[in-house]
Each structure stands twice: as C-alpha cells, then as structure tokens.
Amino acid sequence: MKKCVYEIITEKVIEQLEKGVVPWRKPWINGGAVNWKTQKPYRGINTFLLEAGEYATFKQIQEAGGKVKKGEKSHIVVFWKWLEKEDEQSGEIEKIPYLRYYRVFEINSQVEGLTSKRKETVFDHDPIEKAEEIYKGYINGPDYTFYPGKAVYYPTLDKINCPPLKDFPKVEEYYSTLFHEMIHSTGHKSRLVRPGVITENVAFGDEVYSKEELVAEMGAAMLCGVAGIDNSTIENSASYIHSWIRNLKDDTRLVVQAAAQAQKAADYILGKEASDEE
C-alpha cells in the first residue's frame, strides 16, 4: 500500500512538471524581518542577517520613548545605493556603490517601552490527525522550533524551524512545509548521511543543493500522500521542484532518481525498514 502511494505521488508530480508549472512558493504569510517604524520588509542580504521580527535603530527607539534592555546586542542591517560621480578629467558620469550599515534592535525581545505595529492575520486550523502522527512518530528526530517567517533545517544544530500552523492559510501547506524540513533532517550524519545535507559549504542553487531540494520536496509530497492530505499540495510541490530541475537541465528523470532517496527518507521518518518495501 505504502509503495503504491509513493509511486502515485511520483507520477503526479511528473504530470504537473510536463504541464509547465510556475516555480517557487512560500505558503505562510506572517513573519519576516521588517522596519518597526515603517513596517517595510528588509530586502537583499538583510533577509539573511535578521531573524523574523521588527527592528529599529537606537535613535529611533529613544525618540519613540523606548529603552534597549541591558546587555542586549545589536544586529547589523546593510543599506546601499548607486551614487553618480563626474570624472574630473573625462567629464563622464560614473556610478559608485555607496554602502553603509546600521545597528538595530528587535523591539519585541530586546526593547522595553515599545509595542508591535505589526498586523498579522491568524488562521484557526484543526490539526490533521494522521499528519500529526507522522510528525510525532519520527523517532530520534531533530529538535523543533515554530517561530514565524522562516522554514529551515540547520544540519549543524540538527534543528528544524517551521512557521506555526496559524500562519498558513491552508492547513495542508503547513504539513507539507514541515515534512519538507523533516525529510532534509533525515540526511543528517547520524541518520541517512545524504551529500546534500552533510557536505560543508554547499552553495545555494548548485547541483548538490538542488538535488537535495528535489529529495526533500518529493519526500514531503510522499508523506502528504501517506497522511491523506489534499492533492493540491502536489501541484505546489511540482512548482517548487521545477525551479530546481531547471538548474539541472530540466531532466525529469532526476525526479525519479530523487524519488528513490525520498522514499528511503520517508520510510525512515515512518519507522519502516527497507525490507518492508519488498
């Protein structure tokens, strides 16, 4: 029965890929790092420098009547733009990058006397029983946190962060996202030892990274199938997968190859031995 589910999921993903789907997805709506005063999200490198939250400079905090808590350390945000400068000899206008950084504090955790300006939409979902069983049944799995704004697996810490259930308009997408990170965690050196997880200094978008993303999304789709989660997640998974196989020459055979590793990862989470598939 289980093996049939895996095969069905693989076939459906390939069907969606053949239709020419649009890549990328971010199914949660809250979180991310924003400027406290303007509520504008930080962009570029700042999205990697800052965790989810609302940030303000020391001056902004003082002017608003707040106070930085004793012992709190600031975070760096980078600002840059192009400046135009006229060459004294040729008279030509050249563009010079102007770069500076600011130190900021997260107002909810590091500051006293200020209140959040963020307006968040909260969704009230009932957990999916079978999906919860899969999540809770992952023996000797990683640690978990459920902070807004970022879904990620940290191999060095063996820890997953997934945005909370209330941040997802669709309950199915919460479990698909959580399962994706859980599949990544099976590649840890203490589990299935996959190159995409254990290799140091893997660059975003390179071949090793891309193949690991295929495994994680295929595995997530398979766990959704086992949990009986709505098939609309398959379309979303196919969209995400398409963004990675484009980096690997649009070879849909890679999906089949990734599916084999994904099955092994899904079985690991479900507590199934390889011999169970025979």
Image (tube, rainbow, N blue to C red):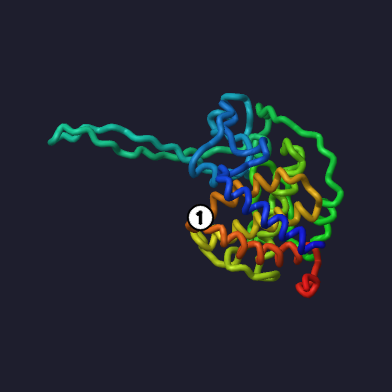
The residue shown at (68%, 62%) is 262
Q: Which amino acid type is marked by label 1?
A: Asp
Farthest top residue in view: 64
Q: Quadrant of the C terminus?
A: bottom right
Question: For residue 1, what is the image quadrant?
Answer: bottom right
Coordinates of residue 35 in the picture (x, y in percent) = 57, 32
> Residue sitting at 72 percent across and 49 percent down?
176
Can you say whether 7 is above or below 189 in the image? above
Looking at the image, which is closer to me, 105 or 83?
83
* Image position of 227 (left or right of 235): right
Looking at the rendered structure, the secondary structure element under dot 1 is loop
Observer-nearest of 48 and 121:
121
Furthest toward the left, the residue is 89
The answer to which quarter of the image holds residue 4 is bottom right
Looking at the image, can residue 159 be seen?
no
In the image, what residue occupies the spot 63% across and 42% down?
26
In the displayed structure, would residue 125 be above or below residue 225?
A: above
Q: Residue under circle 1?
A: 250
Question: Is 220 situated above or below 173?
Answer: below
At label 1, counting other C-alpha atoms closer than 10 Å, the crowd grade (few under 14, some 14-19, many 20 or more) is: some
- Picture coordinates of residue 229, whole percent (x, y): 78, 47
Residue 152 percent coordinates (x, y): 64, 52
For the image, the number of numbered tags is: 1
- Residue 248 in picture, x, y percent from top left: 50, 58
**Residue 73 seen anywhere in this rendered image of the structure:** yes
